[in-house]
Image: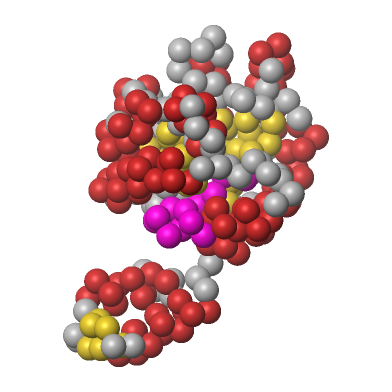
Amino acid sequence: MAATTFLFVPGDRPDRFGKAVASGADAVILDLEDAVAPAAKDSARAAVGEWLESHRALVRINAPGTPWFDADAALVAARGVPVVVPKAEIPGALAGFREVVALVETAAGVERAGELAAVPSVTRLAFGSVDLAAELGVSPEDLESFAYARSRLVIASAAAGLAPPVDGVTTDLRDDARLEADVRYARRLGFGGKLCIHPRQVAPARAAFAPTEAELDWARRVVTAGAAVSVVDGRMVDRPVLARARRILGEE
């Protein structure tokens, strides 16, 4: 799964499902977990199931061990859609699904990131910064607090041959500069996607993941220099550097 922008939409708001698809997000996540109150879980599941009869989206189910997990898992299996599993920290809990985005948002999940990424059904790791912040007692906006956790997901994904992980949400819907800064930071660390909570975040997030003009210019000059060891801007260019340049240009 190589999507860059993932947009959450509450599972109990079927009137918003079509609007989420029309937002231009690469992937829409129908949310049965945090966005839905306990009293509305069953009706939300029914609404999601009905919509998925004629449409396709990811579904964030309720976490393993909750009263709603089994029914949510049955829905995903019946509709044959990818699943986002929250509080992912036990590899065995992910094995029963066909296509999983493992949402790592606990300390135990971060420590087992390599094991989670190695589960055959897992196609992507995603970072749940808000929940992890609550567990650690830190602010979800404090980038320094999560440098280790983010890097752990990046390394685990690469080691397992997965696409780069998906970064957590930016909770301030009005601060476009913060959103762009968050995405640029995540991209620097090796992330390749962003969880969005409002349609207005989709386009800026996608734009912030795109290579800058300076990066594109550098990559073109590196590729032009050829496959042999050479020098560009006073720096050695060899195979790993050439491979990075080709990735920037979308050639790999």
The magenta stretch spans residue 192: yes
Query: Please, which colouring scheme is shown?
Result: secondary structure
Q: Position of residue 173 (x, y in %)?
A: 71, 46
The magenta stretch spans residue 229: no
Q: Position of residue 162 (x, y in %)?
A: 34, 49
Q: Nearer the viewer, residue 98 or 156?
A: 156
**Residue 230 visible in rendering:** yes
Point out the image quarter for the C terminus. bottom left
Q: Quadrant of residue 150?
A: top left
Up/down of 80 relative to 146, above or below: above
The residue range painted magenta reads: 184-196
Q: Quadrant of residue 31?
A: top right
Residue at image coords 33%, 88%: 233
Residue at image coords 35%, 47%: 151
Up/down of 113 relative to 181, above or below: above
Residue at image coords 54%, 37%: 140
**Residue 85 visible in rendering:** no
